[in-house]
Amino acid sequence: MNKLQMIELIRTHHPEASNRLVEMFIEMAANKIAEDTHIYKRSLVMSSVAGKRWYDFPKEALRIDEVYFNDVKIPKLIGDPIIDDDEFQTNAEDTADTELDTPTANVENKRMWVYSPYKQYTEGATDANKEKEKVFARLGIVEKVTNAVTRDGRISDYQSCSITGTYNIRVLGSFLPESFSVAELGVDEEDAMKDYDGPLSAIPKQHHEILLTGAIAMAYKYPPKIDLNMASAFEQEFQLGIKKIKRHSRTRVSTGFIKPHEF
């Protein structure tokens, strides 16, 4: 189902809604599907910098499944290193918050990843730094080296990454779908016939009818046509569709139960 077909079907219920409003309902339904089923999986690549521990992570990320560094899968660190670096600095005049030395390369290369839900914030940030406020969380890369860092009488066995590379960090996980990409909001001539743009690409084509049901349910919850009874009816169908997507996702990647046999 392409974008134009989906908009026309939604308009049979909501003829007063503008193009952009209909797009928003489709995007909201797609976000709900992705959040409940984790069906939209993709990779994200980043470049490592020696001495840099934390890397900005997009707010669209829902879950991290695997992390690869130089094409080698690295495990998740359970817990947090006792010593952090200077990237949570909030006051430039804080002399106790000094930058850690850039670590030297180690032969063992025991790397791990760690997730931080705390975004960076700088007191009195400039307009350029305010872009960081759009980042929801951060991904950290650390290396395990005995007695790697000493600070304030404490010793940590985890140092920041010691290698500078180009797109050598690959993150696999589930994400929220992208929004529709058009030159102007509410203009659908450019992508009207596409079924592979924005949320229509993130949600497989066989589930577009479920996406349509969710968008109609969302539209009944907001002006210009609020009808909570209709919203409840379509919401029930939408939830049944989400369960169907979950079953499909499980059977697509698994063969059921493993039954033991003797040979």
Image: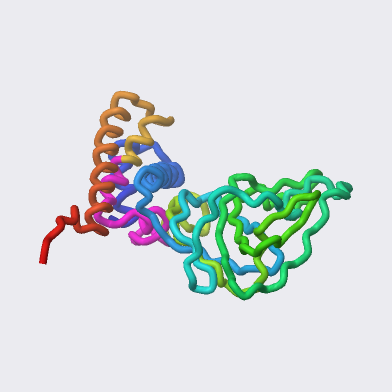
The relative height of residue 41 versus residue 161 in the rendered view (above or below) is: above
Out of 129 and 47, give the one closest to the viewer.
Answer: 47
Quadrant assignment for the N terminus:
bottom left
What is the x, y in percent for residue 249? Answer: 27, 53
Q: How is the image coloured?
A: rainbow
Q: In the rendered view, does 192 fall on the left or right side of 12?
A: right
Q: In the rendered view, does 151 fall on the left or right side of 41?
A: right
**Residue 169 covered by magenta stretch:** no
The structure residue drawn at horizontal position 44% and vertical position 44%, both measured from the top left corner, is 24
The structure residue drawn at horizontal position 62% and vertical position 75%, both measured from the top left corner, is 107
Q: Quadrant of residue 46?
A: bottom right
Q: In the rendered view, does 263 fall on the left or right side of 62?
A: left
Q: Is residue 127 visible?
A: yes
* Region rendered in magenta: 190-213
Quadrant assignment for the C terminus:
bottom left
What is the x, y in percent for residue 215? Answer: 35, 41
The relative height of residue 217 versus residue 142 in the rendered view (above or below) is: above
The relative height of residue 50 versus residue 239 in the rendered view (above or below) is: below
The structure residue drawn at horizontal position 45% and vertical position 53%, both measured from the top left corner, is 175
Q: In the rendered view, does 54 fall on the left or right side of 97?
A: left
Q: Quadrant of residue 113?
A: bottom right
**Residue 206 covered by magenta stretch:** yes
Numbered-mark total? 0
What is the x, y in percent for residue 229? Answer: 30, 24
The structure residue drawn at horizontal position 61% and vertical position 69%, both measured from the top left corner, is 47
Q: Quadrant of residue 32?
A: top left
What is the x, y in percent for residue 143? Answer: 62, 64
